[in-house]
Image (cartoon, grey):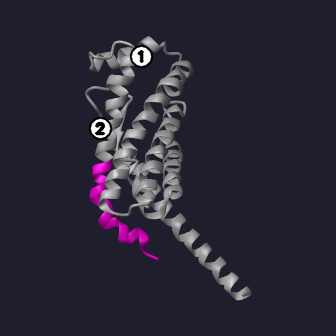
Amino acid sequence: MEMEKKVDVVKKEKWSTRTMVKVSMLSVIAVALMFVNVSVPFAPPFLKVDLGDLPALIGGFALGTVPGIVVVLLKNILNIVLQGSTTAYVGELSNFIVGSMFVIVSSQIYKHNKTKKGAILGLVFGVLIMTTVATLSNYFVIFPMYSKLFGWPMDKIIALGTKVNHLVTDYNTMMIYAVVPFNLVKGFIVSLVTLLLYKPLSPILHRK
């Protein structure tokens, strides 16, 4: 009985070590992908599309929800270490909140239906809930924090949106016509690439 307990402890330790190595690798890839980003024509320039959530989603599907969230956390920490923060850490906070929600919803749905249909369903709901959370967090927390920390009047931030999108005329329309479509587009792109890459990468991440 004592021997069996020791064997179980060793197995858990090995699993934990393997998982940490995989999470670390995914985090490094995620932060590298954050360096490649593009603006979209309908949103202010500080909103940029990147594939940084891709490794976190793949990790969430293959390793579980918690490892996926850890990837989101580590990529933001690594990004701060490598580049510093140009947003007084507000951008990193937003990225963590939104990315974690994407991973939680998508991976939990996939966990209970590990088929292509389950993956698609998870990603669709993930994008929709992520977009909802992103919009609410930006409206009530992130944009007001930007305004306060940088001493920018909200009108100045709205003007950045109006400059590229004539539908943005006030704070509410900034959310509706810039933040919402931005997150939908980003979520769709990341989801599509996840569906294309998860199957080929899955055997590597599941390897003992």
1 or 2: tag closer to the N-terminus: 1
For residue 2, above or below residue 13: below
Camera-side residue: 36 or 190? 190
Q: In which quarter of the image is residue 10?
A: bottom right
Tell me the number on the disc at residue 185. Answer: 2
Quadrant for the N terminus, please. Answer: bottom right
Which region is colored magenta?
A: 191-208
For residue 101, above or below residue 11: above
Q: Distance between the residues labelled 1 and 2?
A: 20 Å
The image shows residue 151 at horizontal and vertical percentages of 53, 16
Q: Is residue 199 magenta?
A: yes
The image shows residue 111 at horizontal and vertical percentages of 44, 60
Magenta segment's dominant SS is helix
| Local crowd size for mark 2, using a 10 Å CA cut-off: few (<14), some (14–19), many (≥20) | some
| Residue designated by label 1 | 171
**Residue at 60% over, 78% down:** 11
Q: Quadrant of residue 46?
A: top left
The image shows residue 55 at horizontal and vertical percentages of 40, 55
Camera-side residue: 28 or 101? 101
Q: In which quarter of the image is residue 13?
A: bottom right
Q: Can residue 44 be seen in this view?
A: no
Tally the numbered discs: 2
The image shows residue 139 at horizontal and vertical percentages of 47, 24
**Residue at 41% over, 53% down:** 57
| Local crowd size for mark 1, using a 10 Å CA cut-off: few (<14), some (14–19), many (≥20) | some
Q: Is residue 73 visible?
A: yes
- Residue at far right of view: 2
The three-letter amino acid code for the residue at tag 2 is Val
Camera-side residue: 164 or 102? 102
Callout 1: helix, strand or loop?
A: helix
The three-letter amino acid code for the residue at tag 1 is Tyr
